[in-house]
Structures are given as C-alpha cells and as structure tokens.
Amino acid sequence: MEDFGVRVERAALLHDIGKLVLRAHPARMNHSEAGVAFLRRYAGPEDEDILRAVGHHHASALRTLSHASPSDLSYLVYEADNLAAGSDRRALEEPEQEGFSARKPLDSIFTMFGREAAGADEVPEVGAYHLQGLLEKERPQYPQPSARVQATTAEYEDLYAYLEANFQRRSPFRMEIHELARVLEGVLSYVPSSTALGEAADISLYDHVRLTAAYAVMLYRYLASKGVTDYRGALFSRDSAQALRQETTGLLVSGDLSGIQSFIYTIPSAGALKSLRGRSFYLEILMENIADEILARAGMSRNSLLYTGGGHFYLLLPHTPEARAALAEARESINDWMLARLGSRLYLALAWTPFASREFLPGAEPGTRGVFRRVGELLAAEKLHRYSETQLAAMFSPESDYNKTLAEGRECSICHTSSVELVPYRDEGAEACPLCAGLFRFGERILTADVFGVAAEPVGDASLPVPGIGRSLYLCALSEREAEAHADWVRLYVKNRVDTGERLMTHLWLGDYSARTEKGGVQEFSELARRSGGSLTARGICRLGVLRADVDNLGAAFLAGFPAQYATLSRTAALSRALSLFFKRYINDVCAGRLAEDGVEPFSLFGREKARERFVHIVYSGGDDVFLVGAWDDLLELAVDLYRAFRKFTGGRLHFSAGFGMFEASFPVAEMARRTGVLEDVAKQHAGKNAIALFGAAASPRAGRTEDLPAVYGWEEFIDEVCGEKLRFLQSHFSFTEGGSAGRRIVLGKSGAYRLLSLLTSAGEGIELARFAYTLARLDPGAQAEAQPAYQEVRRQFYTWYRDARSRMQLVTALQLMIYSVREKETR
C-alpha cells in the first residue's frame, strides 16, 4: 500500500471533484455524494478510505463517521479544506443550497486586488473567464466583461467528458500525484471553487484543491512528527482544532538565486543567442530542480510549490525536524556546489519562518501579509551573511576545492574560472570550462528539445551538472523518444505541454519564442538586426533592439495587494500562478501575434504591412521580468503589445516598466544588458512608474546634450502622443525621400531631418528659436505648390510643440524613430 501521506494528498486533490460532476449533471444530491458516485467507478476495495474522505469532508458528514477510526484521513482533508478556503465550513454546510448559481463564472484573481488602496467604488471591473480547459483554445484566455460571461451546463459537460476520458485511461487512484494534479489543472483551472452569489469567485477549483492537498500533507507530516495519530481528536474537536491552529505547524520557505544577471550575460558576442538561451534555461531548470529536491526531502510534492520564477520560489513545508534539516542541508550543500564550480557568482539564499495555520486566515494578525513580510526580512538578512563559517574558511584557504588551479593556471575564456579543467570552446580556438562549453551546446539542443531530464549520472556527452542536496545531478535536453530510451531518471520536465502518460513528467511553462528563418532555423542576432522594416530588403536602420522590463512594485503587491479580509494564502498562490502563466506562457502568444482581443492588430509604429509573428527572441522571461532581443522596430512594437496584454490580463491592477536600447549586433551582450538595465531603472523613476525609457546614453549623459539623455514616457503617453500624434504627423506631412516631388507632402531628406533634430534637441529662446524658424522657412515649397497646405500646418504645429518642453521631447523621439525607419540597411 502506498505511503499514507500520498493517500492523504490524493484524497485532498479529489475531495471537491463532485462540484464539477454536479454542475455538469445536476442531481438531487450534494457535491460530496456526487463525487463519491463518480469516483467509485475507478476505485478498488483498497481505496475506500479516499472515497470516505471525498464523501465526508464537511462537518455534518463527518459527524456520521463516529464508527470510523480516529486516524481516518477524512479529518485531515476536512481541516485542510477549511484552511485552504480561508473559512471554517461549520457555518456553511452545503454549497449547493439556495444562494448558489452554477452559471457563475470564474472571476479574475485581480478582482479583489488593489481595492484597499483605491477604494472599492473607484476600481473598475477586471472581468471573468469563459468556462473551458486550460489549453482548450489556440489563444490563452483573458478576462472578459462579467455581464458577457456565464458558465453553461454544456461547457461543464465538456470538461466532465475530458476528465472522464483521462480517468478511464488511468484510474485517479493509480496515477502518480503529479500526473493527477496535471489532469486537474487542465480541467479545473477556469472552474470557480465557490459559486456563492454575492461573493467573489476568484479562486479556481484547481487552486483550491491544490492548496488543500498541500495543507493536508503538511498537517499529516507535522502530527506524525509529534506522534499524533488521533486526527479526530486533534482536528475535529472544536477546542483542540482551534488550539492546533495556534501551533506553528508549517514553514513558509523563500529561496532566491543571486547573480543571475552576470551569469546569463557573461558570454562572447559570437554565438550569443545559443549561449544566452542555454544559460537562461539552465537557471530555470536549476531552480525548479532545487525546489523539487527540497520538497522530496521534506516528503512533499509540487502541490506545495507556491511560486517559482525569476530566480525565486516559495514553498509550504511542515514544521518538522526533517524539513528543517533538509533546508539547512540544502543551503549548505547547494552553495558548496556553486562555490566549487562557479566561485561566488551564483548564490542561493534560503530562509524560512514557522507559521501557525490561523495566520493565513482572514482577519488574523499578522495575517498572510505578516508571514510573507517575516520571511522576506529573514531572506534579506540571509543575503548579508552569505556563507557559513566552514565555507568562508575554505574560500580563504589556497588548498580548498574552491581555489584549486587546474589546466596550468589558465582560466575559462568565458567565466574566467580557474578551478576547473578546460576544454575547446566551439571552433574558435578558445578554451572554456566544461560548464560554459556545455551551456552553449545546451542552447543548441533546447531549440528543438521539449524534455529536460535530471539524472544521477551523466547521460551521453551533453549533460550539465546541477546541484542536488548532498549529491551532484546531471541535466540534459532531449526529445521524448530519447527520454524513453533511458529509464533511470531522477525527474523529468517537459516544457509548454500538459500531456499525461505512463512516463511521469513535470510540466513547466517556459517563454521560448524564437524568430525562425525561412528554412526553420533560428535567426542569429545579425540577421535579426537586418530584419528592421519587416524584411531584409525593407528600409530601416540595421540595429538590434533590446528590451528589459519587470513588474512595478511586485513585492508590495504580494504583501498588500489584497484587502485584509481577502488576503488569504489561496489568493497569494493563485496570483503567483497567474503571473507565471502570463510571463512564461502568454508571452509566447503575444510574440506570435495572437493578442488579447479578437480582431485586434499588433501595434505598428509606421503602419507598414508586416508579418504578425515578430522578429524577436525571448532570451529570458521569468515570474515577473523579461529580456527580449529582436529587430528594433518589431521589438518596440511588441513592447506595446505586451503592455496592452498585461493591462488586459490584470485589469490594469499591475503594470511594468521597461528599458529599450538599440545596438549593433556585434556589440558585447553584457554591455547591452547593462545599458538597457540602466534604462529600465530610469523608467522606474518616472512618476507612477508604468513607463518606458528609450535610447540615450543613460549611464553617462553629457551635460546639455538632450539627445544623449533617455526619453522617458508613460506607456499611454508613448502610444498616443509620441506615436499616435507626433509620428503620424511626420508621416502624413513629410516625404523622407531625397529629391523628387512628394505631392501634398513636404520633401524632407535625411539631412533635413537631422538638421531639425539638432535644432529641437538644443532648443531654447533667442538665437535657437530664430534658427528653428529659419529652418522651417526653408521648407516652404512655394505659394502655388501642392504641399503648401501641409507646410502651413507644419509651421504652426511645430512652433506650438517647440514652445512646450514635453511636446518638444515627444517630437524629438518621433523624429528619431522616423529617421531610423528610413535609413538604408547599409548606412552606418
């Protein structure tokens, strides 16, 4: 018989399945009875305890279990259900009674977000989701106006049929826990957990059962560590249950990987794309594997992984000696591994705080916010004291493994580590450490591979070392067929798929969009730069665009985004999952031109006819931040598409700021990243953030030179005033073709455009204004010319914009964009 903790988790995952069954096939029974009737078709005699928990996870039903053993797992599921729901179900016995509607859709998780700061009356509606499976449609779902969305019995029947087909293929009682959770995620992600009228329905049934499972196993592990097996006495007696909620039964764990930026961007320009992708994907899997190692040691599954992304994760563990020992060993062992192979470039900060269950319930003090704030403060303190005494002593010892020098004193040409043997790097005559050389090969493989395998021994010649707890593991990218050929995997990950099957794989959302060549290959940076204007032959300066962006005030959002009465762990976990879904899944669709609204065209700077699929690469897209490269105009247009999609996704409750830079394709990648990162910081200094900073030598501007300063705009200002007004005005009133007639437009060649730009950037009164007026006068095509009306409008409008500093800055940016768009590819 399987581990009792696994049975508890299985029962918790299945405890509310009757809600879907009853909404698809209404009957005169409650959802617990409907769930038992549905599941009994797939159960054997050994599964009666799980069926009993499904049928008795409410107080009224549990009272009829007096004949059952006090150690029945139903009591664990009952209390976990209460904790996950954030309320005690004793006051609300049967959800299918009057006052509930099966037509109620799932509201966006952002429905309650931000209400406390703005006031409920001032916050616009976010919307609700259509009832469907997670990946049922080609394009991901965005919230729609609630008045237009209602769940129907037919839609519930479709979900029921999909669930039934999965369970007929393999019984839910025989599935691995990860596989069962994956099936439920695919079916229940847009099913509301509660359909009570007058209440927010912003928690999906999947998020509820997942957190119920995490709580149930946490309680079981904690009570087992205390030698308690009388669950009825500990969890169902009101006095003892309240007392247990005061005990620190769980640990909230926070992990953060420092040094990500320097690790990713320390690469040569040659083969930059493969190196960047290899390094960013490697760190993604490395963090997932570390979280899985800790969970496995603590006897928990990925249902207890609250969030992972951007080099950070949160875990929910039991407050047991085994879990604390696993965390302490993980911190020491993983940082040992990193010091020996990478020096101090990467560091895992790991902190945890005990919590009492009551702290995550509404109205409790310090509440959910307080627990997350507490672990955040511990993590910040941990980063100030990076290493243990043993590690510090070894770092200063010439004889330690951290400081040994191999390969005759030479160092890696990429990361400059000298403590490892060197191997040839690509075909350039350079030498690199095995990890840097392997990361380049890994970057090649992941462009075609879907599966990432972690094994205890190297698999083939393309394996990369990754840290485990007390052991070294090996990672490789491979096809599903290759994965099936090797049996001895520690764990397998598959990207952007939710397949189920005999081979247990953990699915991960990963932003992996890449612009492809006509033959299906991946475009290198130099080719991307030549794609400005939409093709290799179109006009447009040959430059690579780089975009770095991340969500504004995300830490504060997690701590104070929800009003106190709604600040539950369920909502925090659902918010985390939603953000990961956007930045790791939806971003691929936005890059491919599949936008939030039907019939909406991708944003266009110049109105040119271009392919919907953008000429960009996602180098990195984590839980809240992105690093993208591409043809400069495509990437800037994509930035607007992302902004609009994120605004639609969050209802405007969250926003992000971005830095956008332009570089020659051969420019050092690390310097591209640094300069664009500075621009991102400048955008975040804009009032209210929610801005984009473009161009400019932001790191070291020369005094008095406006063109050397970054242009910073709120997103709507950039869209409406820079592009919608100024750029459109330039396009409609000027022809930027040298010589010849332009009909009703004024002929303005590139030299004239540069002259105007110079005058605008050195604007002022007196002689500067006179020079500007003189330059405008020279544009006069003559009183009888067809372009005379355009000239009169240009003279009036330019003078108005010139006298207003903000409008003048917008015109400078629009003119810069226009000049970049008409430059020939060969022009440097």
Image: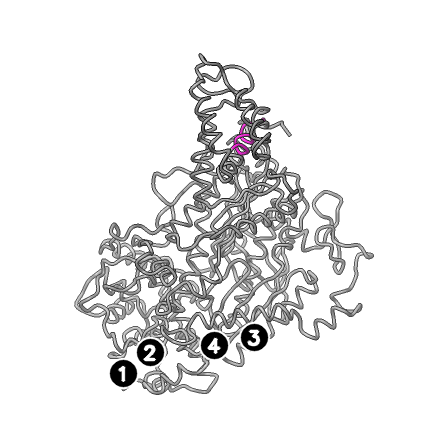
Q: Which residue is mark 3?
A: 326
Classify mark 3: helix, strand or loop. helix
Q: Which residue is mark 2?
A: 74
Q: Which residue is mark 4?
A: 318
Callout in the foreground (3, 1): 3
Question: What residue range appears in magenta?
Answer: 815-824
Callout in the foreground (1, 4): 4
Q: Amino acid at mark 4?
A: Pro
For marks 4 and 2 on the same chain, the one whose residue lies earlier in the sequence: 2
Tell me what residue is drawn at x 42 percent, y 20 percent: 789
Work out how far the residue at label 2 is from the one at label 3, CA to CA, in angstroms: 29 Å
Q: Which residue is mark 1?
A: 65
Q: Is residue 810 magenta?
A: no
Q: Is residue 822 magenta?
A: yes
Circles 2, 1 touching at the beta carbon (< 8 Å): yes
Tell me what residue is drawn at x 34 percent, y 41 percent: 598
